[in-house]
Image (cartoon, helix red, strand yellow):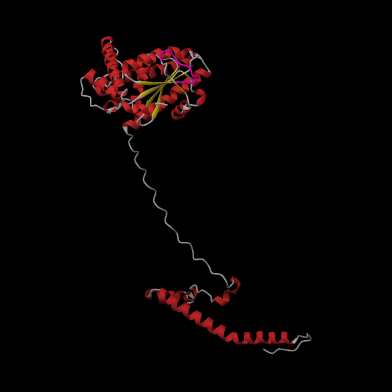
Amino acid sequence: MLLRPTSLSFSLPSRLALLCSVAAALIAQPVVAQERAQEGAQAVAQASATVPASASLDGAAARPDALLEAPVEPRYWRRSREGWFWQKDPPPVAVPKPAPAAPRAAKPLDPDDRDLAELDAFKVRLERALNVATQNPTEANVMRYLEMLTQARQKASTFADMAQAVAVRMPWIDHTLTGGGRPSLPGAQRAYDTIRMQDRDQLLREMAQTHGLYFFFRRNCAYCHVQAPMLAQFQKKYGFTVYAVTLDGGTLPDFPNAVPDQGLAEKVAEAMGVPTQHFVVPAVVLAKPATREVVPVGFGAMTMDEMADRVAMVVRVRDGGAGRGSRHALAALVGVDAQPQGPGAESGDPSLLRGLRP
């Protein structure tokens, strides 16, 4: 192929580029022809390998060009339009879907769960019937609610009867036998009151060996004049040492040797957690010099029995609700052995009460 000069004028770089392109085309022609021949031979060889021997001759005779129809992937430089800087993703692999799991058998309900579910459903129906009857009190709505209310009362009555029948076989939960409650039989009530009073009096006499009482008063207080004789009898009966403290400097006939307050009332109130402005008289405070503990017995006028019960209550609360008094009362009422415990078992020293002096 000859290149004829044209009337167009090219620059030197353009001419060199054109010459190089023409030379590359002339050189590539035999190479491309040779590659095509090699590709055809490879296709024939692959087709021959895949066709069985018994059918190769028949197929070739029937269709001479059958061996040339095998798909051949062209060279990469022949696929320049697809681009050079990317790679085809492999075809997605089909993932087999897992077989659907067989439905699990429903777990049988526990008897307790079944009962609770029925109770919850009944409560929902009862509340719904009540709300509907309240909002729209027709005869039908009210009748429906009253019927369900009757069912609820029957359930409660059945429970009460069963609980009473079972409690008969459980004497350890009977509060009248464990010292925590007063019996209903009149004769048993008298025995209970007598034993409890005797046990309380014994407890207070033992506490008097290790405890004392503060008595705060004012001379111009009418309740203080009522409380003073009661406290003097309490002192005489149980043996408590009473330290009378006057807040206004005056005295009372039953406590002529009262000492004036010099900040003791404020300290005691602070120790008990009582605000000073709420510390009223008459005030009786139980104190234990050995541990410097103070506990209020009461504010205002009280009888001897009230003071005795409150002092004994301090011991019961401290011992977790039972106290030594309850244990001794239980021993006398039901005939069990009572171990010496609580404040009664402590060895008291009257000299310790000197620490109560203001």
User: Could you say which quadrant of the image residue 125 lies in?
Assistant: top left
Which residue is painted at 69% across and 90% down in the image? 2
Q: Nearer the viewer, residue 265 or 177?
A: 265
Q: Residue at x 49, y 76 (%)?
A: 68
Q: Quadrant of the C terminus?
A: top left
- In-front residue for pair 121/192: 192
| Image location (x, y in percent) of residue 138 | 51, 15
By secondary structure, the bulk of the magenta-drawn segment is best described as: loop
| Residue 330 x, y percent position in the rendering | 25, 21
- 235 or 57: nearer the eye? 235
| Image-based side of 317 in relation to 168, left or right | right
| Position of residue 170 in the picture relative to residue 224 (left or right) | left
Please state the horizontal and vertical placement of residue 350, each as a whole percent of the image.
31, 25
**Of the pair 238 and 185, the residue shown nearer to us:** 238
Relative vertical location of residue 30 with respect to residue 339 in this rendering, above or below: below
Residues drawn in magenta: 245-254
In the rendered structure, does residue 253 fall within the stretch colored magenta? yes
Taking the magenta stretch, the answer to whether it contains residue 340 is: no
**In the current view of this chain or complex, which residue is farthest to the front?**
257
Residue 119 visible in the snapshot: no
At x 48%, y 27%, the residue is 263
Q: Is residue 275 left or right of residue 6?
A: left
Location of residue 14 by image quarter: bottom right
Quadrant of the snapshot with the N terminus: bottom right
- Residue 340 is situated, as x and y percent measured from the top left of the image, at 24, 26
